[in-house]
Image: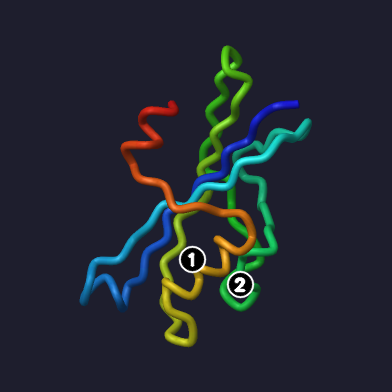
C-alpha cells in the first residue's frame, strides 16, 4: 500500500476578476494502484456537469516515505450555475481539504 495524495488547483475566471479566488485542494488515501500521467480520475466530490474526471498531469513518487503526489489538471470554473465556494464545499464533504502552497512544499 502506498499513500496517494491527489492535488487540484481550482480557480474561477469570473470571481478571479473580483476577488482573485483560487484554492489548492488535496485528498489522501492508501492504495495499491498508483495513477500515471494521462489517467482520468473520478471522485464523488466532482460535479458531473463540469467534467467527467480530472486528468493526471504529474506523478512524483517518494519511496523513502512510501508516498505518491499526483497533480491533476487545474479546474477553472467558467459556468455561473455553481460558484467556487459551492464547488469546494462539495469536495470537502467528500474528503478533500484546502491546503496552502507552503504546506505542500513542506511535505514534498
Q: Disc 1 marks which residue?
A: 88
Res. 47 mark? 2
Q: Residues within 10 Å of mark 2 (few under 14, many from 20)?
A: some
In the picture provided, is 42 more to the left or to the right than 87?
Answer: right
Q: Is residue 17 above or below residue 65?
A: below
| Whole-percent x, y for residue 80 in the image | 43, 85
Residue name at image x 50 percent, y 71 percent: 87
- Among the 4 quarters of the image, the one containing residue 70: top right
In the foreground, 10 or 58: 10
Residue 52, horizontal then vertical, whole percent: 66, 66
| Relative depth, front residue between 75 and 5 | 5
- 9 relative to 36, above or below: below
> Secondary structure under badge 1?
helix
Examine the rendered structure and indicate whether residue 38 appears above or below residue 59.
below
Q: Nearer the viewer, mark 1 or mark 2?
A: 1
Q: Does the CB distance between marks 1 and 2 fall below 8 Å?
A: no
Q: Residue furthest left?
A: 18
The residue shown at (76%, 26%) is 1
* Picture coordinates of residue 100, whole percent (x, y): 35, 45
Amino acid at each position: 500500500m502506498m499513500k496517494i495524495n491527489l492535488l487540484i488547483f481550482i480557480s474561477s475566471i469570473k470571481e478571479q476578476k473580483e476577488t482573485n479566488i483560487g484554492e489548492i485542494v488535496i485528498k489522501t488515501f492508501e492504495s495499491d494502484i498508483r495513477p500515471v500521467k494521462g489517467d482520468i480520475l473520478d471522485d464523488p466530490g466532482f460535479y458531473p456537469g463540469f467534467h467527467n474526471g480530472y486528468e493526471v498531469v504529474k506523478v512524483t513518487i517518494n519511496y523513502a516515505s512510501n508516498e505518491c503526489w499526483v497533480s491533476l489538471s487545474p479546474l477553472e470554473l467558467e459556468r455561473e450555475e455553481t460558484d467556487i465556494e459551492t464547488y469546494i464545499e462539495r469536495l470537502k464533504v467528500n474528503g478533500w481539504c484546502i491546503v496552502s502552497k507552503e504546506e505542500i512544499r513542506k511535505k514534498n
